[in-house]
């Protein structure tokens, strides 16, 4: 089954005064903008710093306005009309510590793995067991790549316990399962318009034969088409304890970022997963350990 995808246009950069952005957002009145400008001239401070000092704005207000000024896509809690999950921390809190750690991981992956010229554009997020944080990491990693201007596709290949559609508040009547079974085409891929450059292919309805679907040539064709159309492809997978799905997906993709959870993942199961992946020639790009004391995630 041959597939083609349209190339996503580049992110358009915008340049608007920060005061105008804050007025449009309802954070400042025109009179308050003038008050800030007068104080700014007197004290030789930046507009945002001055507004915070005057008690008119919070630091987060300023950060969000700057994000909009520089066309940096994010979500506001006040306008998530589709009720997207707050687990999308890189979108809701793009300047928080969790998002900063994920951006650091993005930098490492860009340096050591991703390369469109060498067709290294696909990465699976894998783990030994359910409940390790794979979907959280896959979704937020896709977001930070999109925020960096990369054309990014997030695929939910967990056809057993899918989460991505819930996180992005998507209808899951069509998706990967219906695409692979020939019931839908590329219209199953959803553009997340609030986060420019991010596209999501949800799992679709849970099939009775996930291993067989993922083992079809159609899945390999889908990945080849994605390589031609996107800069980055992130794939969420089920835990290896759920079956051979993750092995099939990762073998097709060629690279994996492994996830474990402190005081949850069994060491022997994790070691067995690593050995199986390596025996199939999968490139292991690193490991993220979730919920270590005093930190959300750490990469190695």
Image (tube, rainbow, N blue to C red):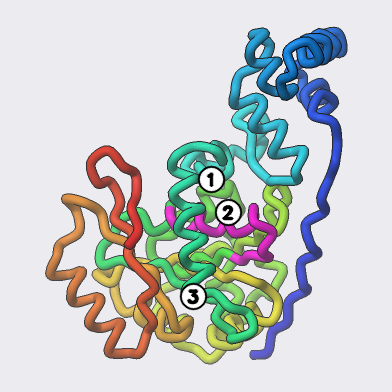
Q: Is residue 201 above or below residue 293?
A: below
Tell me, yes or no, if residue 90 can be seen here. yes
Mark 1, residues whose alpha carbon is within 10 Å: few (<14), some, or many (≥20)? many
Q: Position of residue 185 (x, y in %)?
A: 69, 75
In the shown orientation, is residue 260 left or right of residue 52? left
For the C terminus, which image quadrant?
bottom left
Residue at the spot 25% in from the left edge and 63% down from the top edge:
129
Image position of 281 (left or right of 67): left
Above or below: residue 206 compared with residue 68 = below
Across and down, in percent, residue 216 comes to: 49, 89
Q: CA distance from mark 3 to mark 2?
A: 18 Å
If you read the primary sequence from the N terminus, does the residue marked by circle 3 or circle 2 appear first? 3
Q: Return the residue at label 1.
A: 90
Q: Which residues are magenta?
A: 137-153
* Tag 3–tag 1 contact (CB < 8 Å): no
For the residue labelled by badge 1, is the local secondary structure a helix, a strand or a loop? helix
Q: Are marks 2 and 1 in contact (CB under 8 Å)?
A: yes
Residue 113: give its label: 3
268, 204: nearer the viewer? 268
Res. 191 image quadrant: bottom right
Question: Which residue is pictured at 70% across the width and 15% down the height?
Answer: 51
Helix, strand or loop at label 3? It is loop
Q: Disc 2 on helix, strand or loop? A: helix
Residue 162 sits above or below residue 22 on the image: below
Q: Earlier in the sequence, mark 3 or mark 1?
A: 1
Which residue is denoted by mark 2 in the rendering? 143
In this view, the residue in front, 27 or 77, is: 27
Between disc 3 and disc 2, the foreground one is 3
Q: Nearer the viewer, mark 3 or mark 1?
A: 3
Q: Residues within 10 Å of mark 2 (few under 14, many from 20)?
A: many
Real-space Cα separation, disc 3 to disc 1, in angstroms: 21 Å
């Amino acid at each position: 089954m041959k597939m083609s995808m349209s190339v996503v246009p580049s992110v358009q950069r915008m340049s608007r005064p920060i005061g105008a952005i804050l007025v449009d957002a309802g954070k400042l009145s025109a009179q308050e903008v003038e008050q800030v400008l007068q104080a700014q001239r007197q004290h030789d401070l930046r507009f945002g710093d001055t507004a915070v000092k005057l008690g008119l704005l919070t630091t987060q207000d300023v950060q969000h306005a700057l994000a909009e000024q520089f066309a940096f896509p994010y979500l506001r809690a006040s306008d998530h009309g589709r009720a997207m999950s707050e687990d999308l921390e890189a979108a809701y809190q793009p300047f928080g510590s969790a998002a900063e750690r994920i951006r650091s991981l993005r930098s490492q992956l860009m340096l050591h793995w991703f390369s469109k010229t060498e067709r290294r554009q696909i990465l699976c997020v894998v783990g030994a067991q359910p409940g390790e944080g794979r979907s959280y990491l896959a979704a937020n990693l896709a977001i930070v790549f999109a925020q960096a201007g990369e054309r990014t596709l997030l695929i939910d290949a967990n056809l057993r316990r899918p989460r991505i559609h819930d996180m992005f508040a998507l209808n899951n009547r069509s998706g990967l399962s219906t695409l692979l079974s020939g019931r839908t085409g590329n219209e199953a891929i959803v553009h997340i318009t609030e986060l420019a450059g991010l596209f999501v292919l949800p799992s679709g309805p849970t099939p009775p034969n996930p291993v067989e679907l993922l083992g079809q040539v159609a899945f390999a064709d889908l990945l080849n088409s994605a390589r031609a159309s996107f800069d980055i492809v992130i794939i969420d997978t089920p835990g290896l304890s759920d079956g051979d799905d993750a092995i099939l997906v990762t073998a097709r993709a060629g690279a994996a970022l492994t996830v474990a959870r402190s005081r949850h993942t069994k060491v022997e199961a994790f070691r067995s997963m690593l050995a199986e992946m390596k025996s199939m020639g999968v490139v292991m790009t690193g490991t993220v350990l979730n919920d270590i004391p005093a930190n959300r995630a750490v990469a190695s």
